[in-house]
Image (cartoon, rainbow, N blue to C red):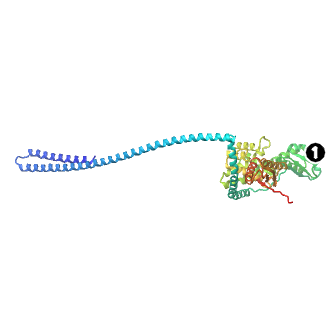
Amino acid sequence: MSQETLYILLAAGALFAAYYFFNRQKSDKTSVDTDAPKGISEAEAKAREIILEAKDEALKIKHEAEDIARKHHQDALELERKVQQREETLDKKLSDLDKKDSELDKKFEEVETKLKELEEIKAQQLSKLERAAKMSREEAKKIIMDAMDAKLRDEKARRIKEAESAIKGEVDDKARNLLVDAMKHGATDYVDEHTTSTVKLPDEDAKGRIIGKEGRNIKAFEMATGVDVDVDESPGVIRLSCFDGVRREIARLSLEELLKDGRIQPTRIEEVVAKKTKEVDKIMREAGEKLAHDVGAYNLPREVIDALGKFKYRYSYGQNMLTHTLEETKIGMALAREIGADVNTVRLGGLLHDIGKVFTDEEGTHIELGVKFAEKMGFPKEVVNIIAEHHEDKPFSSVESVIGYIADAISGSRPGARRESVEDYIKRLKDIENVASGFHGVDKVFAIQAGREVRVIVKPEDIDDSAMVVLAHDIAEKIHDNVTYPGQVKVTVVRETRAHDIAR
């Protein structure tokens, strides 16, 4: 409710009260005694006085309401004037904007027209250049790119040097310390590989008893054990030959038992071989349990323990598999702890990475057989991936797989860990030399230091000093991608220029 309305209502209320009081006095006048004229006159005077006061108050309220209304009207007019001014300002600005939009549209059209003209001129100039140079655009582009490549060769060589220096300066020390510490945790004794075992005879007559009548004893022994028995190699000893270390150990223990007992006959041979087979199985199980406990793997299935125990009599490139597995697993666990990887996954992956090598009676690579065995035993997918990827047969799926690969490479490539045949050694040297020889500008290549370094002699007229750096980098990358080698291969590029003259 507005203030003016309130004032009007108050005035009306005052008039109504005065009127009501006057009528009430008048009514009372007719009902009183006619002998009281003096009281009636006083009431009428009082009523008139109240009415006059009410009229004055109402008039005052009316004037105040009119003043307030007049002020509000002036305020409204002022506000309307300001709004009108703002509308005029906005209209002016909108008009200016429309004018600018029109100018911009016109300029945009002019720019588009000029661009079209420039494209036409460019096409005409290119056509003239092609006719004048007598070559196509692609040929000219190739010439320009070759020139740019030659100009940027120095920059490329400089950047390679800077990148290599920065990487070596920041990474070499930390990586060296990390790997040395990991290898320290996995250090084990070297166990030489044997494909033959010898048994000392108490006397020369023992050879005859071993051979038996018409050779039946030695035939029964070879049949039961699966090894070759050589009684003519040297006096006083018998040589047992077999590539299966488990069979060879059973044969050695069985022959020693038979010589001590003295009863050598086919039936007794079968009994002793069966007995020693159980003993060797027990020895391998204990070896498997010890291997698992040494790396902190507990509650493994019995089938896994038995398979791990077979590593005791298994060798790979002259390296005992039990020793290699222990070494590789400890190195991998140390690396995993340092970089925050899953240590338990690396532990199980390291234990099982070569498990496929013990299944000699099944077809397939040791990786395929190992993956099959691990999946059968219900190991996690991450552990199975370490087995499947530790020779890079598959792309690495996790950092744990990379750690497994690195740990296996460290254990297998450290000095003294493995032996290598002359044929494989020569083949590796030839592969390195062939890779380096395939690059343009190479004159001669020499693999030296057992394949750990390759010297590349280039033709000075084809390769300049800047290109030498790029060539060394490219050769190193190709050797890394195409050649299998232990450790690392250093690439040294040699560029020599000579000047000759004769003094007369």
Q: What percent of the width, then of the height, locates residue 412?
A: 77, 52
* Count of picture labels: 1
Name the residue: 83% across, 57% down: 501
Is disc 1 surrounded by few (<14), some (14 to 19) or many (20+) residues within 10 Å? Answer: some
What residue do we see at 88% from left, 51% from top?
198
Element at label 1? loop
Say whether residue 53 is visible.
yes
In percent of width and height, residue 497 lies at 79, 55
Q: Which of 247 and 115 is in front in this view?
A: 115
For the C terminus, which image quadrant?
Answer: bottom right
Q: Position of residue 141 (x, y in %)?
A: 67, 43
Q: Can residue 286 be seen in this view?
A: no
Q: Nearer the viewer, residue 286 or 179?
A: 179
Residue 359 in the image: state x and y as whole percent: 78, 44
Amino acid bearing label 1 = Gly
Pick the residue in front: 499 or 267.
499
Residue at the disc numbered 1: 212
Residue extending furthest toward the left: 35
- Report the residue at 70% width, 43% height from top: 375
Q: Please identify the residue farthest to the bottom as the structure is shown.
A: 503
